[in-house]
Image (tube, rainbow, N blue to C red):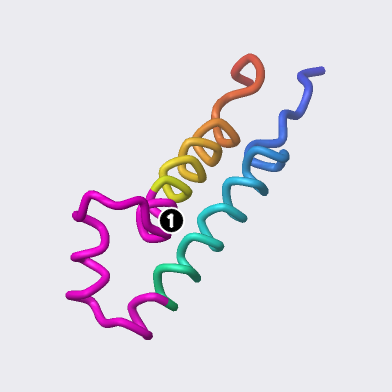
Amino acid sequence: MPEYYRRGRNWYTAVGALFLVTAAIVLVRQVAIWGVEFVGDFMVNGEFTSEKVSLGMICFGGMLMVLGFRRHGPAA
């Protein structure tokens, strides 16, 4: 009898979703406070800003989501 491998239900997916949601909240808050043009300027300047940290969190969360959805066992 083949084993059932649950796909996407592990801590990688949960933590990845947490990172994505947290980063999205920060970016939406910044856009609501400062506006799109000002936040865009923060993203391209040479300083270390929370917008750049949020973009890094989105990349890291996406990577964790990909790891969470990869195949964990033999094909059924």
Task: State the residue lying farthest toward the right.
Answer: 1
Q: Residues within 10 Å of mark 1 (few under 14, many from 20)?
A: many
**Left or right side of 26 for 11:** right
Q: Looking at the image, which residue is at 60% across and 35% down?
A: 68
Q: Looking at the image, which residue is at 55% across and 37% down?
A: 64
Coordinates of residue 2 in the picture (x, y in percent): 76, 19
Coordinates of residue 32 in the picture (x, y in percent): 36, 84
Coordinates of residue 6 in the picture (x, y in percent): 71, 36
Coordinates of residue 38 in the picture (x, y in percent): 22, 74
Q: Nearer the viewer, residue 42 or 32?
A: 42
Asked if the magenta segment contains residue 15, the reply would be no
Residue receiving disc 1: 54
Residue 14 position (above or below residue 41): above
Point out the stretch of residues depicted in magenta.
Answer: 30-55
Most common secondary structure along the magenta stretch: helix
Task: State the residue lying farthest toward the bottom.
Answer: 33
Could you tell me the amino acid type at mark 1? Ser
Q: Looking at the image, which residue is at 41% across and 43% down?
A: 59
Q: Secondary structure at mark 1?
A: helix
